[in-house]
Image (spheres, grey):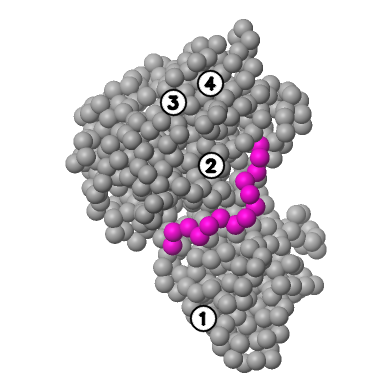
């Protein structure tokens, strides 16, 4: 699922030199045990929608304010055997339901149920979060400082492994793990985490959001076949530090599945011999170029006690990202008004350091779970809150074609160069680069890597920041008017506009893969016609707003650079262009 891109990406990166948890006491209960108590239920548009009420001490401003949730007839909260058995639930009491038709994932923490007989009539939680499983989330998830049903801000369902995956012989995603709060560092988290909960340790203790990978040299030959499926996953994808507690690993409950853990021969304690030093922390923090630790200012929040109660929220401010949460169900099954959408104001500026997913990360693959069993939702590729160092950027290695017929790298491009672009009539032209809206030669940034495949099998790759506008062709008809969309919204099967400089034509080419990569440099050139052809793909020069609105907004800068030569020279600055910054501060959405 798109919500799961945050944590389900493939193996990546180099290990950091940061110590693991051994020096802080190791795993909870002193062993790498598996918990099988969390249910992941499946719903569709025919599933009854049941009244939802926030608990009095709910996390207002961080969690979603909704009035109904889908509740299948057969189901329960975490640790219970049925809805009736869930009444008066004590403990974490997670509620996890994925509506596979509306593509909404409902995850609640500290929940309770009211029933009439065996039928649920109301759900209440301290925090409920709705994830859009068809949306490409940025690397800080729901927003900087925002929690979820897990303290680190992750979706839970996408991190749980299943008996069906063990039976198939492959787990193609990272998995959830937890440590005692007393063994994690207070007031710190790393992307793709977005929140720190109640950790109380200091110094070099591990932090929420960090990814741990089992060392390639670890000898698992003595383990069972089922256990080796899990160790293979831990060597490739690793595990994400998601919450506080004692039972380290989490597999989905088999209560409502067609296959059981007994069927695949995996119990709760196959890994008693595995210790924290058998793992390496991968590009999480501690001096690594990809570090995203967050040390909040003094007074931002108090550290929660080791077993924090529901009212303890140490991350002071949650800035929710603008994630669409419309319910696509047609009303059958008693569907209710959709979940509330977070405010449309742009998120606060995230840390400047990029998240820990490197360029080699391939797209994630959803688990091969039989249709009869509710799997954790599948995972589209990741996005980023750093948006390639700005809102509208390309990496330094991206190439453009000049009027002289040369291919130049984005890092070599200069104001005054004429490059291939598309004009307002849909024709290929060479247009003058009159400014850089953003220009950061150093540093590594997040980009969406979009791969399209031509009829002859040739692959074309565009790497662009997630909120950059690209042109999606709505049909194979080259004359059809394209729609401009955020790059993060592209999906497999969508059609991109591709330029053929040889004959001056523009053709529609299908997308075959979308994933997240980390690249050097971030550049946002803008041409007089407002478009640019990058690595043969036609793209807008703008981000966040519609292409037409943004192009109109930059008319004064175009005029200034034509009339005043000094304005053009000032447009090759390092960092954000003054006019782009003015628009961003004024309108918040034109660049």
SS for callout 3: loop
| Residue located beneath label 1 in the image | 573
Q: Is residue 549 above or below residue 67?
A: below
Q: Nearer the viewer, residue 208 or 234?
A: 208
Q: Nearer the viewer, residue 577 or 259?
A: 577
Q: Which of the 4 quarters of the picture holds residue 262?
A: top left
Q: Between disc 3 and disc 4, whose residue precedes? A: 3
Residue at the outermost left position: 23
Residues under numbered marks 2 and 4 in contact, where contact means CB atoms less than 8 Å apart: no
Residues under numbered marks 3 and 4 in contact, where contact means CB atoms less than 8 Å apart: no
How crowded pointer 4 is (Cα within 10 Å; few <14, some 14-19, many 20+) is rated as many
| Residue located beneath label 2 in the image | 62
User: Which residue is found at the position 68% from the left and 21% from the top?
Assistant: 48
Q: Is residue 182 magenta?
A: no
Q: Which residues are magenta?
A: 339-352
Q: Position of residue 350 (x, y in %)?
A: 48, 58
Q: Main secondary structure of the magenta part?
A: loop
Front position among marks 1 and 2:
2
Q: Between disc 2 and disc 3, whose residue precedes? A: 2
Q: How far separated are the C-alphas under marks 2 and 3?
A: 18 Å
Q: Determine which of the numbered discs, if any, sits on residue 112 in the image.
A: 4
SS for callout 1: loop
Q: Between disc 2 and disc 4, whose residue precedes? A: 2
Front position among marks 1 and 3:
3
Q: Between disc 1 and disc 4, whose residue precedes? A: 4
User: Which residue is found at the position 40% from the left and 47% from the top?
Assistant: 301
| Residue located beneath label 3 in the image | 92
């Amino acid at each position: 699922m798109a919500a799961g891109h945050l944590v389900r990406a493939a193996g990546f990166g180099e290990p950091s030199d940061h110590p693991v948890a051994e020096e802080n006491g190791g795993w909870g209960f002193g062993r790498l045990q598996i918990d099988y108590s969390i249910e992941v239920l499946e719903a569709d548009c025919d599933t009854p929608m049941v009244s939802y009420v926030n608990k009095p001490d709910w996390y207002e401003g961080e969690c979603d304010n909704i009035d109904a949730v889908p509740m299948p007839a057969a189901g329960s909260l975490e640790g219970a055997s049925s809805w009736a058995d869930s009444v008066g639930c004590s403990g974490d009491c997670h509620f996890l339901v994925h509506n596979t038709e509306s593509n909404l994932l409902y995850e609640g923490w500290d929940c309770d149920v009211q029933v009439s007989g065996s039928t649920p009539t109301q759900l209440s939680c301290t925090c409920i979060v709705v994830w859009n499983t068809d949306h490409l989330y940025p690397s800080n998830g729901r927003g900087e400082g925002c929690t979820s049903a897990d303290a680190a801000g992750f979706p839970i369902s996408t991190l749980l492994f299943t008996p069906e995956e063990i039976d198939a012989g492959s787990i193609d995603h990272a998995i959830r793990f937890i440590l005692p709060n007393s063994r994690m560092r207070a007031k710190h988290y790393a992307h793709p985490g977005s929140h720190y909960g109640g950790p109380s340790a200091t110094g070099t203790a591990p932090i929420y959001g960090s990814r741990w990978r089992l060392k390639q040299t670890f000898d698992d030959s003595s383990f069972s076949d089922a256990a080796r499926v899990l160790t293979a996953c831990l060597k490739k994808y690793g595990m994400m530090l998601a919450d506080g507690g004692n039972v380290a690993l989490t597999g989905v409950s088999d209560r409502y599945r067609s296959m059981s853990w007994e069927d695949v021969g995996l119990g709760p304690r196959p890994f008693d011999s595995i210790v924290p030093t058998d793992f390496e922390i991968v590009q999480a923090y501690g001096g690594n170029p990809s570090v995203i630790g967050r040390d909040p200012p003094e007074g931002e929040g108090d550290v929660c006690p080791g077993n924090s109660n529901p009212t303890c929220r140490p991350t002071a401010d949650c800035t929710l990202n603008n994630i669409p949460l419309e319910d696509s169900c047609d009303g059958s099954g008693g569907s209710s008004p959709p979940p509330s959408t977070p405010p449309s104001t742009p998120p606060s500026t995230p840390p400047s350091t990029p998240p820990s997913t490197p360029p080699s990360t391939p797209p994630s693959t959803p688990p091969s779970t039989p249709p009869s069993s509710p799997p954790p939702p599948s995972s589209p590729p990741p996005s980023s809150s750093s948006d390639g160092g700005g809102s509208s950027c390309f990496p330094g290695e991206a190439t453009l074609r000049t009027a002289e017929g040369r291919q130049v790298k984005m890092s070599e491009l200069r104001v005054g160069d004429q490059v291939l672009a598309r004009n307002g009539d849909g024709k290929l032209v060479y247009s003058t680069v009159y400014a850089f809206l953003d220009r950061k030669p150093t540093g590594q940034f997040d980009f969406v890597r979009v791969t399209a495949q031509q009829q002859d099998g040739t692959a074309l790759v565009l790497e662009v920041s997630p909120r950059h506008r690209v042109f999606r062709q709505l049909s194979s008809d080259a004359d059809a008017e394209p729609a401009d969309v955020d790059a993060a919204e592209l999906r497999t099967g969508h059609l991109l506009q591709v330029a053929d400089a040889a004959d001056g034509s523009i053709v529609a080419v299908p997308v075959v893969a979308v994933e997240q990569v980390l690249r050097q440099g971030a550049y946002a050139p803008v041409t007089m016609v407002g478009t640019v052809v990058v690595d043969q793909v036609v793209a807008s020069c703008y981000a966040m707003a519609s292409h037409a609105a943004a192009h109109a907004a930059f008319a004064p800068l175009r005029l200034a650079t034509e009339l005043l030569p000094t304005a053009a020279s000032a447009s090759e600055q390092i960092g954000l262009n003054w006019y782009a910054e003015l628009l961003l501060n004024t309108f918040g959405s034109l660049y």
